[in-house]
Each structure stands twice: as C-alpha cells, then as structure tokens.
Image (cartoon, helix red, strand yellow):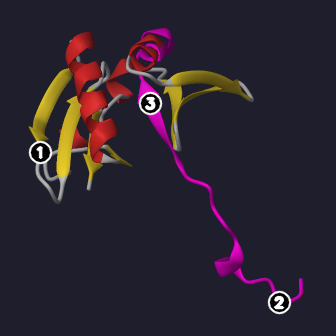
C-alpha cells in the first residue's frame, strides 16, 4: 500500500445515528428547527451546516433511550458548535417553535450555550465561543 499516512486524510465532519420512535415525526421536528432532510441510500439524513443526524426508526419504542437519560450519562447526547450570533438565532427559533429547553441559555463573552430536548428525548446542546 505504500506510505499512506492517516494524518494526511481530511475528514469533513461526522454523523450521529439517532434511533427514533417515529421517523416522520422526527423529520418534521428537525425540519421545523432548520434542518434539511435528505434521503441517502435509504437513510434519512437531517443536515444543518456541517451537522448531520441520521434518523433510524426503532423496531421497539422501548429501544429509544438517549444516553442523557441514563444515570451517570452526560446532560447531552449531541453537542453542536456555532458562533454567538448564530446561537442567538437558533435560540430565537427554538423559542418561536415551542422547543423544550432543558439547559440555558447561558450567555457570556467566553462561552454561550443552550440545550434542547427533541421529540425522542435526545438532548442536543449548542455552544458558541
């Protein structure tokens, strides 16, 4: 294979798979807050800038268990980074759409953050510096 160096590979981003109770309800939820749905290879990708959530419908609703709901888990399942101006715009969108806000908003010069809970219980944190 020669001298391939993995450090020279430029990754563009990552995706997270969210196991959801109802695929269409989840698509509608994320579209309402600015994500764009795209069907790629039979999988629904919800895109917002460099952030992609791949939605996959669970066979059993009891299988939808966000990590943030597990004792000892973090307060978020996904963390998204942006800049302070766009974070305020997101927060205004969340408020106008009646999105459940579970943490924040916390505004400061060095770091600002807000965390929402989606329709499947996933806590999505948005932060900016």
Does 35 sit above or below residue 29?
below
Disc ID at residue 19? 3
- Decide whether residue 113 is among the magenta residues: no
Does 6 sit above or below residue 16?
below
The mark lying in front, picked from 3 and 2, is 2
Residue at the far bottom: name it: 3
- The local crowd at label 1, few if under 14, some if 14 to 19, many if 20 or more residues have their Cα within 10 Å, is some
- The local crowd at label 2, few if under 14, some if 14 to 19, many if 20 or more residues have their Cα within 10 Å, is few
Q: Is residue 32 left or right of residue 3?
A: left
Mark 3 or 1, nearer chain start: 3
Q: Position of residue 95 (x, y in %)?
A: 20, 18
Give the labeled residue for mark 1.
Answer: 107
Alpha carbons under labels 3 and 2: distance apart: 39 Å
Identify the residue shown where x is 28% and y is 50%. Answer: 128
For the N terminus, the quadrant is bottom right
Q: Is residue 106 left or right of residue 37?
A: left
Q: Position of residue 90 (x, y in %)?
A: 30, 29
Residue closest to the eye, 53 or 94: 94
Q: Position of residue 107 (x, y in %)?
A: 11, 45
Q: Secondary structure at mark 1?
A: loop
* Residue 123: quadrant of the picture: top left
- The local crowd at label 3, few if under 14, some if 14 to 19, many if 20 or more residues have their Cα within 10 Å, is many
Q: Position of residue 116 (x, y in %)?
A: 22, 30
In this picture, which residue range is highlighted in magenta? 1-27
Q: Secondary structure at mark 3?
A: strand
Give the labeled residue for mark 2.
Answer: 3
The mark lying in front, picked from 1 and 2, is 1
Q: Is residue 58 left or right of residue 68?
A: right
User: Are the two marked residues, 3 and 1, in contact with CB atoms closer than 8 angstroms?
Assistant: no
């Amino acid at each position: 294979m020669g001298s391939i160096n993995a450090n020279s590979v430029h990754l563009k981003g990552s995706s997270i798979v969210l196991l959801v109770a109802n695929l269409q309800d989840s698509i509608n939820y994320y579209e309402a807050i600015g994500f764009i749905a795209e069907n790629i290879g039979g999988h629904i990708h919800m895109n917002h800038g460099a952030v992609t959530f791949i939605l996959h419908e669970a066979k059993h609703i009891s299988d939808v268990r966000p990590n943030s709901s597990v004792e000892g888990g973090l307060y978020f399942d996904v963390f998204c980074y942006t800049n302070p101006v766009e974070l305020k715009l997101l927060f205004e969108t969340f408020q106008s759409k009646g999105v459940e806000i579970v943490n924040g908003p916390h505004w400061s010069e060095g770091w600002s953050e807000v965390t929402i809970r989606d329709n499947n219980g996933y806590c999505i944190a948005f932060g900016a510096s």
